[in-house]
Image (tube, rainbow, N blue to C red):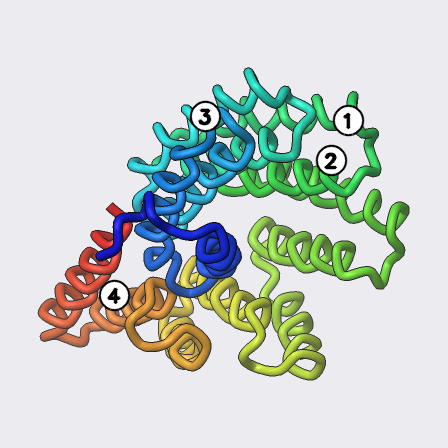
Amino acid sequence: MQDPRLMSEEDFEKSYLTVAELVDGPHPERAVQMIEDLIVRACEELEIDNETVINLRMYLGRAMWRSGVSARAIPILESALADAKKSLGWQHRVTFSCAGNLCRALGDVGRLDEAIKIAKAIYEKRVRVFGELDNGTLNSLGHLSQLMFDSGDVAYAVDLMSSLYDKRCQAFGKNDDRARCSWYNLTVMKAQLDNDEQSLLDLLAQYMAEYGSDHPNTIGLWAHLGGLLERTGKLSEALEVWREVEERRHVVFGEVAIPTLDAVGHRLRLQSSLGDDGLLDQIEVVRRTKALIRRQAI
């Protein structure tokens, strides 16, 4: 393998653009080594607290938590955030990105109190600096709402998401994609709060007609519906929904990808709970395959 320190400026720029796409794609683990190489190359000319290097460290942490190794991502993001605050200041977009990704990684490992504390600070700082209707401020409000939802405070999450929807309608208009995203999230949250199966079915029908069965939000609604059915004891119906999620994710992400394997594992566990014996070996294969994928991010 070529020494990353010898990478040309042109190759550096190409790899940088590739990384930005990989990190948020179906296989973020493939970006990890590339980002580490880019950091080595960048540090040949730049200090560790340079904006470009901090941004790459943020991408590295993001790639890791999206690959399921959030515990490994946390110290990387904590260090990047500390340097960003010191060298760039709290008002810089990279600083906010480091903080937001740190919140996500902390939430993934169950450190929700810490994540929520940081998310509240981010939102309050954005309000003071950029105003309540700034796009970044509204994104922070949405992140805070999602963390409250993940922590189990669904009622408060609904209040925050309802406020976000109103503010985005005010700022961008009801038909803007950002406002529609808030409505999507609000519907999902309210459905969990009230066990409202019909609202998910109605929104699912809308997304199927408008975007098709393979759109990420359509697949997401299938997964939320499956979770609701499972919580309300409709296990056979939930199993069929998770078969649909598995099939759709297979089409979109491929067979050997974390989102697909998560759906396979969920489907197998449901089958087992319904009395289908002999699935332990398959469940173990799924677990081991996910572990192999995650090792690429370590």
Residue located beneath label 4 in the image:
269
* Amino acid type indicated by mark 2: Thr
* Up/down of 88 relative to 137, above or below: above
Q: Answer whether labels 1 and 2 touch (C-beta < 8 Å).
A: yes
Between residue 6 and residue 172, name the one nearer to us: 6
* Amino acid type indicated by mark 3: Glu
Q: Answer whether labels 4 and 3 touch (C-beta < 8 Å).
A: no
- Mark 1–mark 3 Cα distance, whole angstroms, equals 31 Å
**Where is residue 215 shown, x and y percent of the image?**
58, 74
List the single residue furthest toward the top.
86
Q: Secondary structure at mark 1?
A: helix
- Residue 89 in view here: yes
Between residue 273 and residue 132, name the one nearer to us: 132
- Mark 1–mark 2 Cα distance, whole angstroms, equals 6 Å
Residue located beneath label 1 in the image:
127
Between residue 58 and residue 144, name the one nearer to us: 58
Which tag is nearer the camera, tag 2 or tag 3? 3
Q: Answer whether labels 1 and 3 touch (C-beta < 8 Å).
A: no
